[in-house]
Image (spheres, helix red, strand yellow):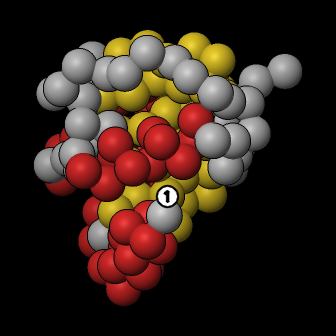
Amino acid sequence: MATKAAVGGAGTAVGAALLAKLAQGALGELELKATSAAPLPPPSGAIKSLSSASSASALLSEAKLAILLEGTPAEFQAAGKALAPGAIVGVMGATNALIVASAAGEGKTVTAISKVAQAAGEAVLAAQ
């Protein structure tokens, strides 16, 4: 069974690289929802379904795994409130992760994706 997952900011350069890695099966089979200003690619590989979400609630209410790459402080706060019980979330930037974690309440795991880790990840993706 595919895991329900979410990507906020899928239309960014990092988001596009992330979708490519997810399609290769980096996290197993996924039912993915994403937010993106750009059109989303068709589902492929390990991404069994890919749909667009218009709000934090629509994006995160059922996701067990989420990666949030962009947003305003208000959007990050809404994301924290919308997280499903037991969700595991990676958020770009320590301050943004703090906003999400503060709004998330108990039973959710929120971690920051820092610029150092981001730069290392981008270097790995660029080398492939």
In screen coordinates, is 103 left or right of 66?
left
Q: Residue at x 76, y 24 (%)?
A: 2
Residues 106 and 15: in front is: 15
Q: Position of residue 1 (x, y in %)?
A: 84, 21
In screen coordinates, is 59 left or right of 76?
right
Element marked by disc 1:
strand
Q: Position of residue 14 (x, y in %)?
A: 31, 54
Looking at this view, name the residue that lies furthest to the bottom.
116
Q: Is residue 114 visible?
A: no
Q: Position of residue 68 (x, y in %)?
A: 38, 48
Q: Residue at x 24, y 50 (%)?
A: 13
In screen coordinates, is 37 left or right of 60?
left
Q: Position of residue 81 (x, y in %)?
A: 42, 38
Q: Is residue 4 visible?
A: yes
The image quadrant of residue 121 is bottom left
Residues 83 and 29: in front is: 29
The image quadrant of residue 8 is top left
Residue 43 versus residue 11 in the image, above or below:
above
Neighbours of disc 1 within 10 Å: few (<14), some (14-19), many (20+): some
Q: Residue at x 66, y 36 (%)?
A: 64
Residues 82 and 119: in front is: 119
In screen coordinates, is 75 left or right of 108?
left
Q: Residue at x 34, y 43 (%)?
A: 16
Residue for badge 1: 90
The type of residue carrying mark 1 is: Gly
The image quadrant of residue 84 is top right
Residue 120 versus residue 76 in the image, above or below:
below
Looking at this view, name the residue that lies furthest to the right.
1
